[in-house]
Amino acid sequence: MRTVTFGRTGLEITRVGFGAWAIGGSNWAFGWGEQDDEESVAAIRRALELRVNWIDTAAQYGLGHSEEVVRRAVEGEPRLLIFTKGGQPEGPNRTSYQSLKRDSLRRECEGSLERLGLDAIDLYQIHWPIPDEEVEEGWSALAELKAEGLVRHIGASNFSVEQLERAEAIAPVEALQPPYSLLDREVEAETLPYCEEHGIGVIVYSPMASGLLTGRMTRERIESLPADDWRRQSARFREPELSRGLEVVERVKAVAERHGVSPGAVAVAWTLRHPPVHGAIVGFRRPDQVDPIVAAVDLELSDDDLAELEH
């Protein structure tokens, strides 16, 4: 599988990475419903067979459970890169809260290292820049963790340009993880150009809009999502946003049919066609989901395709 140099990190990453949010399980605020850990492990191993060389997870995903599943799946895979995130430590009753305090981030990092079975994390990221007034303390903490060798590279997720600039004044931001899809293009205006100008590596999350752009999400399926699937509460899966999203899905399906690929592959390939984007994080929960989406890596969208998708 083709690789690209991931910005300032110098890492060579495949253009698609395994996103481990959904495999965190259901017993937390942003779960995707009940998951089968054996299926999750099999999905990761199928991605590795196809030469996907990085996984993105977070301490918050299932309050540590996602990292534990990742460890089970990847033991003995030295070529694999592991990215994870902190800044949302566990609170009472399986909740989490926002903290970028130095000591809190250090505890989270140490917990991730233990769950993942690692001596050092390849990329450690601040999950959300919340509270905003703690961004400087949090970024300083990540710089310390890197200096100590507990993490190899440091990055941010969901940061604005203004927050990136504040972090840059302390230590270089090596990577950014923003949301980006045909239904979420806000980062095109300022954030992606800033990253390109400053050599910041970009891996985008939710390129399929949390499953909506896979082509399999009908109104009926959305209505039948389990009560513990966070998408039931998401504005994207409710009117008026839902109708807009389903209109885009029809255009994605048409392009996919022309190319003989899945709609999800088209949605992911669309994010990868933007020069500042080095990779896309794709969530898989079963091994049969992997091959149809990884096809995005080799999909070249024409100008006519782009015009139709962005209509």
Image (cartoon, grey):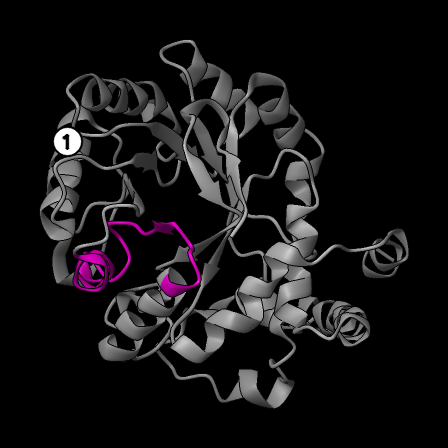
283 and 134: which is toward the camera: 283
Q: Where residue 128 sits: x, y (%)?
A: 39, 39
Residue that lies at the very extreme toward the top in this rendered image: 169
Q: Say how many tags the image has.
A: 1
Q: SS at mark 1?
A: helix
Where, by quadrant of the figure, is residue 247 drawn? bottom right
Residue at point 63%, 84% (across, down):
218
Left or right: 230 as drawn, with respect to 211: left
Q: Where residue 8 sits: x, y (%)?
A: 46, 22
**Range drawn in magenta:** 49-75
Seen in the picture, residue 102 relative to 290 is either above or below; the reply is: above
Q: Where residue 113 sits: x, y (%)?
A: 14, 42
Q: Can residue 31 be seen from the camera position used here? A: no
Q: Where residue 17 sits: x, y (%)?
A: 44, 53
Q: Can residue 284 be seen from the camera position used here? A: yes
276 and 126: which is toward the camera: 276
Left or right: 178 as drawn, with respect to 257: left
Identify residue for label 1: 106
Residue at point 64%, 47% (across, down):
272
Left or right: 291 as drawn, with respect to 112: right
137 and 174: which is toward the camera: 174
How busy is the neighbourhood of tag 1: few (under 14 within 10 Å), some, or many (20 plus)? many
Is 4 in the magenta?
no
- Say which quadrant the C terminus sits in: bottom right
Q: Amino acid at mark 1?
A: Arg
Is 72 in the magenta?
yes
Seen in the picture, residue 228 relative to 7 is either above or below; the reply is: below
Residue at point 48%, 32% (across, down):
6
Seen in the picture, residue 12 relative to 133 is either above or below; the reply is: below
Seen in the picture, residue 94 relative to 227 is either above or below; the reply is: above
Residue at point 65%, 74% (across, down):
262
